[in-house]
Image: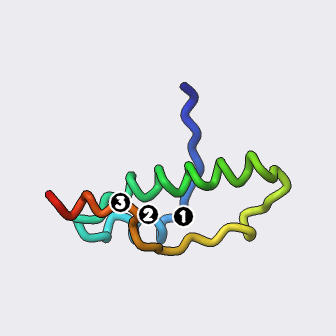
Amino acid sequence: MAKYTAPIDEDTRQRIHALPGKVKFSAFMRKAIEIFVEELEKNPELQPENFVITVTARKDASYKKK
């Protein structure tokens, strides 16, 4: 499986490292990339400015049972 990388600026990197420990950044990014790829498959003409990441409520509340 190919690995893709994209450079991020130092400010963004510092902000990611400053997130609280309970925030699982990789889980958020996996979901964001999944949605991103689905949208690009539908319309490959999209540009970065066409994407806005927002927070929505979880559809599955099973995480609360832990």
For badge 3, the amino acid type reads: Asp
Whether 19 is drawn above or below 41: the answer is below
The local secondary structure at tag 1 comes to loop
For badge 1, the amino acid type reads: Asp
Left or right of 38 on screen, residue 18:
left
| Residue 37 numbered mark, or none | none
The local secondary structure at tag 2 comes to helix
**Residue 21 lies in quadrant:** bottom left
Q: Which residue is mark 3?
A: 60
The span from disc 2 to disc 1 (Cα, nearest Å) is 6 Å
For badge 2, the amino acid type reads: Arg
Cβ–Cβ below 8 Å for labels 2 and 1? Answer: yes
The span from disc 3 to disc 2 (Cα, nearest Å) is 30 Å
**Position of residue 16 measured from the top left corner of the image (x, y, whole percent):** 39, 65
Q: Which residue is mark 1?
A: 9
| Residue at far right of view | 45
**Position of residue 5 measured from the top left corner of the image (x, y, whole percent):** 57, 44
Location of the N terminus (image quadrant): top right
Q: Residue at x 81, y 50 (%)?
A: 44
| Residue at far top of view | 1
Q: Residues within 10 Å of mark 2 (few under 14, many from 20)?
A: few
Left or right of 35 on screen, residue 29:
left
Q: Which residue is mark 2?
A: 13
